[in-house]
Image: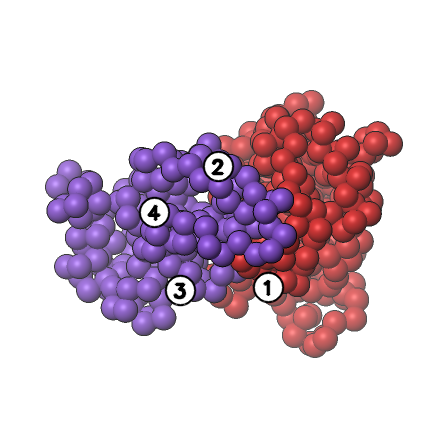
Chain colours: A red, B purple
């Protein structure tokens, strides 16, 4: 046997899942969704949860819907489902650009969008997407359901504001306006490996100048975040090389302390420039 | 099962899973991986175990037709589902799958350790992408590590198999 012993629970309804989690969370019980991070950690016995709450058979947890201008992603929606066809317009295009960078295909058929958010890896493509687009994350417990903005959900390395007894029951990504341009760039040392850096940008061009820019950077700090200085540097300007350069420099200027500041600066400016160029 | 540890008996579940077209019923420990269930309980040792933490791709199988890592699933999770292993790819005992034929013809396997995972990954890939470029094949197998580094011949074999399968031969 690879993992240490645990008690296994297989709830069929969200109410049952939340009730079991409330009971086992204080005993280091853990939720099992795609299992592409938790199961390897258990195989190496870095994680030894006493209880596993397997949510894969909970009715409705695999639902992926567009409703009220939002893409609603259930907790068992796999990475592979989030391709270009998952959402209309620019959001679908963006998902189609980002998703192939997540590990490898046989991981993407099992791993989940919501699981990536709950895992909060600093190099997670979906965490970057969630903060870039101001996703809302719904957490349910015996106390009710609350909706958490992505930026307040991701606290730092592998740390979220989810309470131990809260189940992430849905993530909601806003659709992008029809004139939104989207760009994504990631650098990793090997295909499918964790990102050294990644940048996600979206903006529109209205009246010849940049409007509603969002520029988010991930992989370099403890969590991905929007770079307000970079967005301010480009808004209202003609989208040319000079404007892109200002945004890239502003993003690099705003970086917190990193292990190798010169290298981090190069990665940040290059990623932002290439993501902006890809969106142009 | 001979590998049950003391105290595990309380954590046993009955499962039924269709493996290569045959319904297999059994009682498994909840902490048994699907890979170990296939190899130890069903004696289907064609599914290889390399890293056992999802990195090497050797244990890739098809779950309801889609490539997944058998080392990252618990056997109990596939209850009621359908699994195809490398043993289930050939249409009969005497006829190989076109991809297996091409691996033989183009020296697509050396030591053979990565081959089951390569084949299962590529069977699904060629269904979705019947006329791939060499670059697309390389991306498709980027999660399968060949310790002999025989990638060139694996790519050649895949392109040849794709052409044969398009021709219906």
- Whether residues under marks 3 and 1 lie with C-beta atoms below 8 angstroms apart, the answer is no
Residues indicated by labels 3 and 4 sit on the same polypeptide chain: yes
Evaluate if marks 3 and 4 touch, with contact meaning CB atoms under 8 Å apart.
no
Could you tell me residue A169's position as x and y percent? 71, 34
Q: Earlier in the sequence, mark 2 or mark 4?
A: 2
Which residue does the numbered mark 4 point to in the structure image?
A: B85
Q: Is residue B102 left or right of residue A20?
A: left
Q: CA distance from mark 1 to mark 2?
A: 25 Å
- What label sits on residue B157 in the rendered view? none
Q: Which residue is mark 1?
A: A44
Q: A249 or B7, which is in the foreground?
A: B7
Q: Which residue is mark 2?
A: B15
Residue farthest top in this picture: A68
SS for dot 1: loop
Residue A123 x %, y %:
64, 58
User: What residue sits right under mark 3 in the picture?
Assistant: B145
What subunit carries mark 4?
A: B
Cβ–Cβ under 8 Å for marks 3 and 2: no
| Residues beneath discs 3 and 2 located on the same chain | yes
A103 over B22 or under it: above or below? below
């Amino acid at each position: 046997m690879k993992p240490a012993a645990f008690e296994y629970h297989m709830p069929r309804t969200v109410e049952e899942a939340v009730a079991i989690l409330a009971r086992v969370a204080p005993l280091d019980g853990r939720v099992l969704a795609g299992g592409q991070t938790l199961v390897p950690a258990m195989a190496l016995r870095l994680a030894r949860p006493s209880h596993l709450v397997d949510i894969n058979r909970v009715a409705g947890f695999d639902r992926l819907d567009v409703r009220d201008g939002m893409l609603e992603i259930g907790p068992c929606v796999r990475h592979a489902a989030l391709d270009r066809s998952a959402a209309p317009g620019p959001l679908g295009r963006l998902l189609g650009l980002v998703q192939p960078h997540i590990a490898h295909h046989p991981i993407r058929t099992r791993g989940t969008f919501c699981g990536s958010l709950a895992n909060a890896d600093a190099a997670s493509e979906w965490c970057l997407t969630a903060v870039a687009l101001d996703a809302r994350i719904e957490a349910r417990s015996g106390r009710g359901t609350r909706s958490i903005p992505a930026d307040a959900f991701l606290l730092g390395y592998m740390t979220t504001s989810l309470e131990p007894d809260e189940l992430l029951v849905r993530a909601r990504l806003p659709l992008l306006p029809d004139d939104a341009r989207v760009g994504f760039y990631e650098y990793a040392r090997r295909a499918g490996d964790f990102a050294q850096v990644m940048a996600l940008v979206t903006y529109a061009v209205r009246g010849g100048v940049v409007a509603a820019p969002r520029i988010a950077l991930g992989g370099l700090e403890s969590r991905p975040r929007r770079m307000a200085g970079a967005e301010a540097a480009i808004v209202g300007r003609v989208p040319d090389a000079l404007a892109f350069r200002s945004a890239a420099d502003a993003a690099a200027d705003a970086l917190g302390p990193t292990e190798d500041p010169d290298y981090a600066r190069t990665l940040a400016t290059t990623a932002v420039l290439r993501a902006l160029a890809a969106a142009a | 099962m001979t590998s049950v540890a003391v105290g595990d008996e309380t954590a046993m579940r009955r499962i039924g899973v269709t493996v290569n077209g045959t319904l297999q019923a059994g009682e498994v420990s909840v902490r048994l991986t699907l890979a170990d269930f296939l190899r130890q309980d069903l004696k289907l040792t064609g599914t290889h175990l390399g890293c056992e933490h999802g990195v090497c791709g050797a244990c890739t199988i098809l779950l309801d037709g889609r490539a997944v890592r058998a080392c990252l699933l618990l056997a109990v999770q596939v209850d009621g589902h359908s699994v195809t292993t490398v043993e289930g790819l050939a249409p009969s005992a005497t006829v190989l799958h076109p991809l297996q034929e091409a691996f033989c013809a183009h020296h697509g396997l050396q030591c053979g350790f990565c081959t089951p995972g390569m084949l299962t990954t590529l069977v699904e890939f060629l269904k979705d992408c019947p006329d791939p470029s060499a670059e697309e094949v390389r991306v498709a197998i980027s999660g399968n590590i060949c310790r002999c580094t025989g990638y060139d011949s694996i790519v050649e074999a895949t392109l040849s198999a794709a052409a044969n399968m398009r021709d219906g031969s």
